[in-house]
Image (cartoon, rainbow, N blue to C red):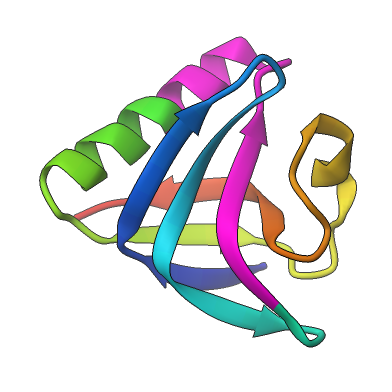
């Protein structure tokens, strides 16, 4: 598991995912990753992530995103393989 420090720039809700875009990105395999998503198929988890994303954006807080850089399964719910990764956890101070 890897971590990334994210200052939220954009928070979104779609039928298949919730996501956050950060002001900075991380390079993974030559790809600039600034989007982090979670599937809405787990509605309780998606709701918790969305709440954390929105609060961090509204309060200008930094998130710590937990992710697997090699996990490309987010593409099944709209997270692009070249600019997005599925998140497994997030914390905010």
Residue 14 spot, x, y in % from top left: 60, 21
| Left or right of 60 on screen, residue 85 | right
Seen in the picture, residue 13 relative to 19 is either above or below; the reply is above
Q: Residue at x 71, y 21 (%)?
A: 16
Residue 60 spot, x, y in % from top left: 14, 54
Nearer the observer, 93 or 62 = 62
Q: Is residue 35 magenta?
A: yes
Quadrant position of residue 2: bottom right
The stretch in magenta equals 32-49
Residue 22 spot, x, y in % from top left: 42, 61
Quadrant position of residue 75: top right
| Left or right of 36 on screen, residue 68 | right
Outermost residue, left side: 59
| Left or right of 62 on screen, residue 41 | right
Q: Residue at x 54, y 39 (%)?
A: 19
Seen in the picture, residue 50 relative to 30 is either above or below; the reply is above
| Left or right of 62 on screen, residue 59 | left
Q: Is residue 34 magenta?
A: yes
Quadrant holding the N terminus: bottom right
Nearer the observer, 20 or 66 = 20
Please give the count of numbered marks on the rendered protein: 0
Residue 89 spot, x, y in % from top left: 53, 47
Quadrant holding the C terminus: bottom left
Quadrant position of residue 57: top left
Seen in the picture, residue 35 relative to 6 is either above or below; the reply is above
Q: Residue at x 57, y 55 (%)?
A: 35
Seen in the picture, residue 73 relative to 35 is either above or below; the reply is above
Q: Residue at x 21, y 36 (%)?
A: 55
């Amino acid at each position: 598991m890897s971590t990334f420090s994210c200052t939220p720039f954009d928070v979104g809700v779609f039928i298949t995912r919730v996501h956050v875009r950060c002001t900075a990105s991380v390079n993974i395999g030559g790809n600039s990753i600034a989007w982090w998503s979670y599937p809405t198929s787990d509605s309780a988890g998606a709701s918790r992530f969305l709440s954390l994303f929105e609060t961090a954006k509204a309060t200008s807080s930094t998130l710590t995103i937990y992710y697997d850089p090699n996990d490309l399964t987010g593409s099944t719910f709209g997270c692009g393989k070249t600019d997005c990764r599925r998140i497994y956890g997030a914390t905010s101070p």
